[in-house]
């Protein structure tokens, strides 16, 4: 078994697709509010219990009830970081999911999912949907009478069928499980666990629905499409989403206060933290994003590890206070789960549109660190590390996340979290809770000039000294001071930390590099949410540079790009923000681009295709199909 | 240890105009600290932007001079992190009732144990005398070319409606009354407002002189009792609020009461609410052990996520 897996790794790295390796994409969808979220969780957990890895993603409208949303879950033997463009199995009980919907102007809101199914794939629809309308002869269509299933169970449990309408989510999962050859016991076990904490009648109803679905499928003599083999995970795997990972990073770092204002897609992180009181993290939702960032900064001034989580519009509102944290050298951590911008943009869609904004956010110059995780695991580590950077270098740290990661769901190894936590050291830098050592007649200076530009930091309540902060330019004590030489020195103190940061941070914090950039046909440069698709489609012919530290900008990047035979910058925005940022820092304009800016994440197969086009001489490829 | 006025001597010389009411407020704050014998190390004076907000730089306690309109959320953040600190806000009427009004009202929903000492002189002095939200309509002051075209807000009424649990008013010339009210506000457990009518000899000399205040302000009647006797009795709380509102509505631009309008020792502070949830204050928690390892126990969380 191990040998086979090892062989696969080698073959895959050579770009060989292994025919019998499990890689199944499953899709479901429907009207928001019709219980499809439950289907996502139930299906994903069933696959994890069956010993597989999952990578899932949700697409939905900024709406609570009625609009169309859908989920894709990719089930694989090895861990994956992205979706492909087509699915193997899709299940929908409403006809809008199949055929699409139009608005009052007869324009498509979405065009349905018939086209998303790979040739040879399977589509499960309700028997009430007219299958003759589906113009695909290359897929298998299975019709299920979901109403009959519901009526049968309702009669047996003496309930009204209307009460059971919501259980179509379970019919979707049970029928898919049947087709994939999942054993009934596992499915029943997963239903019990999924609805744990709900009234017993809910578990009973959903179990009956699942059994009835399977009985229906077999009485209709529907043949399974495969017999998925049950495997054993080597360790304990969790069903995790990106926002959960950011929250775990904060918990590990000892963050004890999270202030937030509701915003899609960031609020999930804060509600997750609040629903886990064992973190002992205070979660407060004040009146505005302005209040949020000021409370975070206040809590940090008082000595707490404090953070917020927001998205582009919220971050825009927080700008002035971030400059305050900059000039007062206050350690705060802000996670920006980017979404489609500008203004309210596309609240529920993804984009890497905030980079140019955050690198110059606010009036004036000040020291700051911006990091950009690219995978769910990196969300954990880079968020946790952000707190160490904030306190060691005494400045605001922005974690530039993205909806593509925040609302991706994966199977994550619980031991990975434990082992990361075990290796993580809390570094509070020059924070001194005890007595300040002062010479006779000397007073404590919060902004004392030092060789490394970092001053000893105390917090209110220090037994030996008091401290002052001001948003004005200040002297070493922290009192407003406008004298010219002092101004020069203070500006150089705050900006001068960059050299120290770049000297101290390890390579893995600055960038990730696979392959040999000087030997590969193509050097792919990217960041953030585009990373997952690139990892999944990379083969031996490309070298991949993931820029993780956006500011201060690592000098090594210039050397790496300079070595490459050919380069392409891949990112999810229209203007090529990383490319422009690299050009401004290194003087090198990466010659080729792959861009996507329709609000949807990059798929590994479209990336593979685009990369081969670049290799073949195209200068710019725009991926905007879906 | 006994705190003396000398301990609070400024590090910096203040640069307020001669005769500025801020001097009276600063003197009162220092005397309040001495009066209550507060440890300056455990005290934080938070301010916004404007003449008044320079105050933290002129007193030897911890001082956080923040952004225009934002001292309230900064102060709330400080208090949420470390409830052992005494957190006082000194900022102006423009800062608190203008650009910061959203925070002023919303703070009432939380009843965080912070104290607002608002320097209320009707003008934005540091930008040369524009009208603030408390300048009455049609009043002409030096810095504005035409009489004020905006109406004034009533901060005491807003505080009452918003949920403040201690509401008082005084003037910057009356040190004794200020010390009395500031002391009561600090001893009060909960969100307190002391609106301090303040002299601005430069931009609003006519309506904020000591003479003007002598003629136009008077203490609340001795018979007026602002204190809720039984904090758990919501009927009494309602009645006291009605009494306070009646008293506030007796006032107008030319006749103003000073003293405590409303005081409710409501045990439901924000700190209390968080403690009831079992979430201790951040500063009371050890986040790292002696080897700098994270002390968080993730077993329960991971257990809930493991499939």
Image (tube, rainbow, N blue to C red):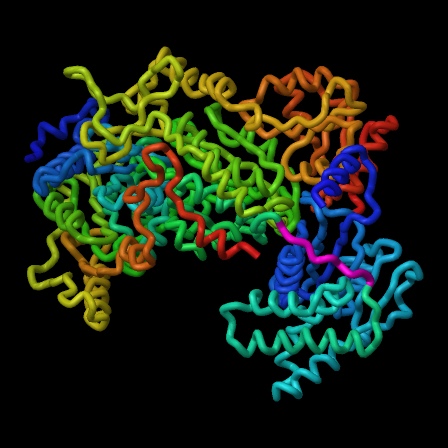
Q: Is A615 rendered above or below residue A354? A: above
Residue A298, visible in the rendered structure = no
Q: Is B194 rendered above or below residue A218? A: above
Which residue is found at the position 62% from the left and 42% from the top?
A342
Quadrant location of the N terminus of chain B in the rendered image: top left
Where on the picture, by quarter, is residue A510?
A: top right
Residue A278 pos. (x, y %): 39, 53
The extreme right residue here reads A137
Q: Is residue A154 magenta?
A: no
Magenta stretch? A225-233
The extreme top residue here reads A485
Residue B274 pos. (x, y %): 32, 55
Which of B236 and B296 lies nearest the eye of the viewer?
B296
Residue B213, visible in the rendered structure = yes
Query: In the image, A559: left or right of A327?
Result: right
Query: How many numbered tags mark residues here?
Result: 0
Which of A541 and B233 lies nearest the eye of the viewer?
A541
Q: Is the magenta stretch mostly helix, strand or loop?
A: loop
């Amino acid at each position: 078994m191990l040998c086979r897996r090892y062989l696969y790794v080698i073959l895959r790295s050579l770009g060989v697709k292994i025919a019998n390796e499990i890689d199944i994409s499953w899709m479901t969808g429907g009207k928001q509010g019709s219980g499809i979220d439950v289907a996502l969780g139930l299906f994903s957990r069933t696959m994890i219990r069956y010993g597989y890895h999952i990578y899932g993603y949700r697409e939905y409208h900024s709406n609570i009830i009625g609009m169309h949303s859908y989920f894709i879950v990719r089930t694989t033997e090895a861990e994956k970081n992205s979706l492909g463009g087509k699915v193997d199995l899709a299940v929908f009980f409403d006809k809008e999911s199949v055929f699409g919907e139009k608005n009052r102007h007869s324009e498509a809101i979405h065009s349905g999912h018939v086209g998303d199914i790979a040739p040879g794939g399977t589509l499960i629809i309700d028997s009430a949907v007219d299958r003759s309308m589906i113009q695909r002869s290359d897929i298998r269509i299975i019709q299920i009478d979901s109403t009959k299933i519901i009526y049968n169970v309702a009669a047996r449990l003496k309930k009204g069928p209307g009460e059971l309408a919501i259980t179509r989510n379970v019919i979707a999962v049970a029928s898919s499980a049947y087709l994939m050859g999942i054993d009934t016991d596992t499915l029943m076990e997963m239903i019990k666990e999924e609805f744990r904490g709900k009234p017993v009648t809910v578990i009973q109803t959903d179990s009956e629905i699942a059994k009835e679905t399977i009985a229906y499928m077999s009485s209709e003599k529907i043949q399974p499409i495969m017999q998925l083999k049950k495997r054993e995970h080597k360790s304990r795997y969790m069903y995790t989403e990106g926002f959960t990972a950011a929250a775990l990073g904060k918990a590990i770092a000892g963050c004890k206060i999270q202030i937030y204002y509701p915003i899609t897609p960031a609020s999930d992180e804060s509600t997750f933290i609040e629903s886990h009181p064992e973190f002992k993290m205070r979660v407060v939702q004040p009146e505005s994003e302005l209040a949020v960032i000021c409370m975070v900064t206040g809590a940090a001034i008082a000595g707490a590890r404090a953070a917020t989580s927001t998205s582009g519009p919220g971050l825009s509102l927080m700008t002035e206070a971030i400059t305050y944290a900059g000039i007062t050298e206050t350690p705060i951590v802000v996670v920006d789960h980017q979404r489609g911008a500008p203004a309210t943009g596309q609240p529920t869609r993804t984009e890497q549109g905030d980079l140019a904004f955050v690198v110059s956010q606010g009036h004036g110059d000040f020291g700051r660190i911006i990091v950009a995780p690219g995978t769910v695991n990196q969300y954990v580590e880079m968020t946790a590390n952000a707190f160490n950077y904030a306190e060691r270098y005494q400045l605001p740290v922005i974690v530039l996340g993205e909806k593509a990661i925040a609302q991706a769901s994966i199977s994550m190894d619980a031991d990975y979290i434990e082992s990361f936590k075990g290796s993580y050291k809390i570094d509070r830098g020059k924070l001194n809770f005890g007595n300040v050592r002062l010479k006779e007649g000397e007073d404590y200076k919060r902004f004392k000039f030092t060789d490394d530009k970092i001053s000893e930091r105390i917090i209110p309540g220090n037994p030996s000294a008091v401290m002052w902060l001001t948003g004005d330019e200040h002297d070493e004590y922290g009192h407003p001071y406008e004298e010219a030489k002092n101004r020069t020195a203070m500006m150089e103190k705050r900006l001068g930390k960059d050299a120290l940061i770049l000297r101290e941070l390890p390579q893995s914090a600055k960038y990730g590099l696979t392959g040999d950039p000087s030997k590969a046909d193509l050097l792919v440069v990217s960041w953030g949410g585009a990373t997952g698709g690139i990892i999944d489609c990379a083969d031996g012919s490309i070298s991949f540079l993931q820029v993780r530290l956006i500011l201060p900008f690592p000098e090594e990047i210039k050397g790496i790009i300079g070595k490459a035979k050919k380069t392409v910058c891949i990112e999810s925005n229209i203007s090529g923000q990383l490319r422009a940022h690299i050009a401004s820092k290194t003087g090198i304009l990466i010659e080729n681009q792959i861009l996507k800016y329709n609000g949807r994440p990059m798929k590994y197969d479209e990336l593979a295709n685009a990369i081969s086009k670049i290799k073949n001489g195209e200068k710019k490829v725009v991926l905007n199909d879906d | 240890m006994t705190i003396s006025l000398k301990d609070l001597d400024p590090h910096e010389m203040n640069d307020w105009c001669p005769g500025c009411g801020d001097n009276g407020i600063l003197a009162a704050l220092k005397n309040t600290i001495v009066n209550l014998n507060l440890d300056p190390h455990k005290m934080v004076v938070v301010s916004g932007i404007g003449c008044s907000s320079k105050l933290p730089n002129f007193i030897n306690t911890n001082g956080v001079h923040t952004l225009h309109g934002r001292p309230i959320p900064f102060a709330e953040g400080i208090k949420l992190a470390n409830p052992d600190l005494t957190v006082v806000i000194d900022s102006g009427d423009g800062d608190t009732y203008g650009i910061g009004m959203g925070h002023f009202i919303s703070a009432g929903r939380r009843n965080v144990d912070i104290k607002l000492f608002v320097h209320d002189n009707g003008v934005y002095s540091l930008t040369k005398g524009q009208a603030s939200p408390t300048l009455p309509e049609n009043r002409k002051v030096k810095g504005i070319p035409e009489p004020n075209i905006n109406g004034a807000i009533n901060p005491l009424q807003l505080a009452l409606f918003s949920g403040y649990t201690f509401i008082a008013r005084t003037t910057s010339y009356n040190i004794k009354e200020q010390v009395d009210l500031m002391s009561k506000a600090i001893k009060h457990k909960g969100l307190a407002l002391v609106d301090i009518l303040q002299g601005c000899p430069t931009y609003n000399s006519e309506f904020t002189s000591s003479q003007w205040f002598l003629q136009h302000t008077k203490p609340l009647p001795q018979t007026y009792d602002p204190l809720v006797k039984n904090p758990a009795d919501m009927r009494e709380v309602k009645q006291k609020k009605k009494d306070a509102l009646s008293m506030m509505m007796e006032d107008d631009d030319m006749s103003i009461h000073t003293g405590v309008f409303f005081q409710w020792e409501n045990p439901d502070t924000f700190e209390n609410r968080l403690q009831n949830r079992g979430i201790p204050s951040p500063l009371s928690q050890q986040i790292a052990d002696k080897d700098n390892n994270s002390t968080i126990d993730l077993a329960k969380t991971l257990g809930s996520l493991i499939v």
